[in-house]
Amino acid sequence: MEQRKHWWNGKWGRLARRDVYLRADADQWFVEQRAGGAEGVSRFYEYDSEDEAYEAVRALLTGPDDWRPLDGSAI
């Protein structure tokens, strides 16, 4: 599995930090939504296309947080 993108909400600390990851493996796309940093709780979503996965990412990045790409990319 290859990690393609990573965003975080710019907040430090276990209670405030949120991350969203986009990963690909062959023809499957995976989105991970993590709350609480490295040791936090994750929810995983699986998609059949890159477009569907990006739609999910865009939905997860909406809201009051100031989401930042950690890999130098944008959504």
Image (spheres, helix red, strand yellow):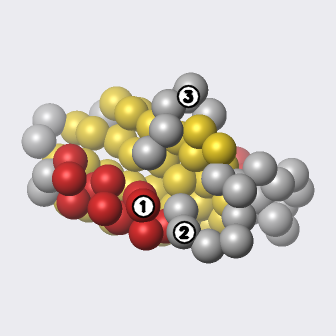
Q: Which amino acid type corresponds to the residue marked 1 in the rendered image? A: Arg
Question: How many neighbours does mark 3 have within 10 angstroms: few (below 14), some (14-19), or many (20 or more)?
Answer: few
Instruction: In the rendered structure, find residue 71 and report the number of the disc placed on it.
Output: 3
Q: Can residue 48 be seen from the camera position used here?
A: yes
Q: Position of residue 16 (x, y in %)?
A: 81, 65
Q: Can residue 39 be seen from the camera position used here?
A: no
The local secondary structure at tag 1 comes to helix
Residue 54's image quarter?
bottom left
Real-space Cα separation, disc 3 to disc 1, in angstroms: 16 Å
Residue under label 1: 58
Q: Which amino acid type corresponds to the residue marked 2 in the rendered image? A: Thr
Locate residue 18 relative to residue 28 in the image: left or right: right
Residue under label 2: 62
Determine whether label 1 and label 2 are within 8 Å by CB.
yes
Which residue is found at the position 71% from the left and 56% from the top?
A: 66
Q: Position of residue 38 (x, y in %)?
A: 70, 48
Q: Position of residue 35 (x, y in %)?
A: 67, 65
Real-space Cα separation, disc 2 to disc 3, in angstroms: 19 Å
The local secondary structure at tag 2 comes to loop
Locate residue 49 relative to residue 7 in the image: left or right: left
The C terminus sits in image quarter: top left
